[in-house]
Image (cartoon, rainbow, N blue to C red):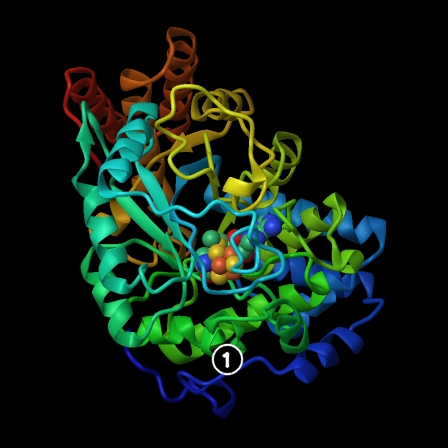
Amino acid sequence: MIFNPEKCRIKDERMKPFIDIEEIEDHLATTKNPDKQEVLDIIQKSLNKNRLSLRETAILINAEDTELIEAIKDGARQLKEKVYGNRIVLFAPLYIGNKCKNNCLYCGFRSSNKAAIRNTLTDEEIIKEIEALEDNGQKRLILVYGEHDSYNPEYIAHTVRLAYSVKKGRGEIRRVNINAAPLTIEGFRTVKKAGIGTYQIFQETYHKPTYEKYHLGGPKKDYDYRLTSLDRAQEAGLDDVGIGALFGLYDWKFEVMALIRHTNHLEACYNVGPHTISFPRIKKASGLSIDNKYLVSDSEFTRIIAILRLAVPYTGLILTARENAEVRDEVIRFGVSQIDGGTKLELGSYSKSKNEEQDLNKEQFAINDTRSLGEIIDELIDKEFLPSFCTACYRLGRTGEHFMEFSVPGFIKRFCTPNAILTLAEYLTDYATPELSEKGWNLVEKELQKLNEPKLEKQIREKLEKIKNGERDLYF
Ligand code: SAM
Ligand code: SF4
């Protein structure tokens, strides 16, 4: 990305910490009890396809009135429907190793948790896991690692290459994202060369005193090093990055503001915001030791998602199986663009023949949505969502796809919906039960009609025929 010195104000120097607690607290303190019209105008600004400022975000956060909360949720729902449509991208996490030098009090993998059973998958085990994931129909993975000397950039790059190399039947992994510790600039270059998609790093909490309370040992103790990690990624030419906060450590209002501040920082310095934002809520973990004061309720969680949707209307929002099926079904409408499906967190568990009970000593935390990928796709279709495994933009070098979806008129109709249809068709042909297949093809028909573009419909139908005849990986 081209460095834009004009946009990079003193506050937003490259590679320099940018969170100012006072600035955020000041915005939150001076926007209490906002005027109804002001809130409605801000929602409209977002619906008119403008991102919101920190102050405007604070106003939405401070809208506590039931009627205004409903207006915000409704705005987010409208924005999702109008701009992004009904596609939901599916992926699966794959835990590679849980050795960890850090001592994060909320995490089952932390070094002081002696009950944790430590393991790193061998190459053979990784291959088996990926084959099992491919047999389920997965095309997009996120590889997850603890922070340990053995999970260095060369090793991460090796596992990424390995993941891309495994092809079973018609299965293949087309996009490998990463969730791992912060790297040096050189380290980010190494993993970029392996062809990764997004590099995700969550700040956990942007509130430094709270951060220090929860990170008691290991390199992760260094708040600033973590905060500037995605600057180093950008410096290394890796501009596809994901940010996130672990909700429940500190006040959710502060964290939402900080996520927006982080977005502004990346945009100011590198002209590109994060590809995705994640908002995990703390779940049960082996030996979990946290203060319950800031745990986020379901209704607050919905507000968080709706506010993020409106504040950064062109950023992907990821919701994971930490949440149960009910919560996921409810909040997905407010702007989520990606979810995981068929998730298992225990190392090596995708290739095990039977589903075992969750054992917290083998997992980072408990998941609450244990539905299989097939079940999730089935239910998405019932709710008129269009499941997608599309990886076209990243493979064609069309980076910043959310931004294009958002700002290029007709982009979704021309590229995203057709590619969602094609990848769903592959899934239905290769992996679905006859019942799901029937349902899925009905949805494909409906989506083709909805496009209302005979020429495009014809092009898609030609590709669908090719899929039925065994061709794979067709996209626009
Ligand atoms: N070790 C790497 C790191 O810390 O950046 C990888 C991260 S970890 C395997 C993935 C994420 O899980 C963490 O960044 C954290 O936000 C989240 N996490 C940790 N403990 C959790 C818990 N008890 N409940 C929900 N999410 C948790
Ligand atoms: Fe290690 Fe990451 Fe867990 Fe912290 S959150 S203990 S760094 S695996």
The quadrant holding residue 13 is bottom left
- Res 278 seen here: no
Q: Which residue lies furthest to the front in this view?
A: 114
Q: Where is residue 381 in the image (x, y as percent from the top left)?
A: 49, 22
Q: How many marks?
A: 1
Determine the secondary structure under disc 1. helix
Give the residue type at disc 1: Asp
Q: Where is residue 68 in the image (x, y as percent from the top left)?
A: 79, 53
- Tell me what residue is drawn at x 38 percent, y 11 percent: 433
Q: Answer above or below: position of 1 versus 403.
A: below
For label 1, the crowd category at 10 Å Cα-Cα, with few meaning under 14, some 14 to 19 and many 20 or more, is some
Residue in the foreground of this view, choosing between 316 and 173: 173
Q: Answer above or below: position of 363 versus 270.
A: above
- Tell me what residue is drawn at x 38 percent, y 25 percent: 352
- Please name the residue that numbered disc 1 is placed on: 224
- Tell me what residue is drawn at x 41 percent, y 61 percent: 147
